[in-house]
């Protein structure tokens, strides 16, 4: 968590020092912190799917999914701080942006809070599974919306900067769906196998 927060904070401070604390510098810092946050979110989001689809080599990522999720939540505080700064300097994003990304932020910190063992046990296993499923997928959707938006006059440099994140934002839910499909297939096959 400290490493995630520290890396994102240092990156934002360096960019703001180089490009200024106005709208342009803040926009670039927001783009970078969103990408860094996404890279921490990905293992939390699809670690289990990777382990299910590709075997034990990904078990460590699956086992550390909570750690990656908490690192993402800690690092994302910097991104949210930049949004507050953008509003303060008079360049607030449209209301629709606040609705989508605000809900995603609420999910981020709700899931982080519910990952505390005592609260996790209080909500129960079934409720946690549904909250986790809905929350993680909503956060993934918010990232996908952010990365897939391409300005009308986007140049090749802009597209190259976003293309890897667009691919990851699309591929990660596909991996989760494939892992779910494999689980359903294996469960059905095992239930129809004759007992020995």
Image: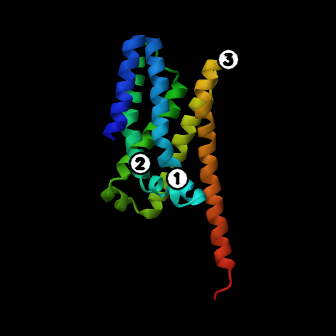
Residue 111: assigned label: 2
Q: Nearer the viewer, residue 87 or 155?
A: 155
Say which residue appears at 30% left-offset and 58% top-offset: 118
Position in image of residue 157 (x %, y %): 61, 19
User: Of the numbered discs in the image, which one, if any, rests on residue 152?
Assistant: 3
Tell me the element at label 2. helix
Name the mark nearer the viewer: 3 or 2.
3
* Disc on res. 133: 1
Image coords of residue 120 (percent x, y): 36, 58
Crowding at dot 3, Cα within 10 Å, few <14 / some 14-19 / many 20+, comes out as few
Q: Residue at x 49, y 37 (%)?
A: 38
Q: Is residue 1 visible?
A: yes
**In this view of the protein, can residue 21 be seen by the observer?**
no
Is 88 on the left-hand or right-hand side of 173?
left
- Give left or right: position of 63 versus 54: left
**Quadrant housing the N terminus:** top left
């Amino acid at each position: 968590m400290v490493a995630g927060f520290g890396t994102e904070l240092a990156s934002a401070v360096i960019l703001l020092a180089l490009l200024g604390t106005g709208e342009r510098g803040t926009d670039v810092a927001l783009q970078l912190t969103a990408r860094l946050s996404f890279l921490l979110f990905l293992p939390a989001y699809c670690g289990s799917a990777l382990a299910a689809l590709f075997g034990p080599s990904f078990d460590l990522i699956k086992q550390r999914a909570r750690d990656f999720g908490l690192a993402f939540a800690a690092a994302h505080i910097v991104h949210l701080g930049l949004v507050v700064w953008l509003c303060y300097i008079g360049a607030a994003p449209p209301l629709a942006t606040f609705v989508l990304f605000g809900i995603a932020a609420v999910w981020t910190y709700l899931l982080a809070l519910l990952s505390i063992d005592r609260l996790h046990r209080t909500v129960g296993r079934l409720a946690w599974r549904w909250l986790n499923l809905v929350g993680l997928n909503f956060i993934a959707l918010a990232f996908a919306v952010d990365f897939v938006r391409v300005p009308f006059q986007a140049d090749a440099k802009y597209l190259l900067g976003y293309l890897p994140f667009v691919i990851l934002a699309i591929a990660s839910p596909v991996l989760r769906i494939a892992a779910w499909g494999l689980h359903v297939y294996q469960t059905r096959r095992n239930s129809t196998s004759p007992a020995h």
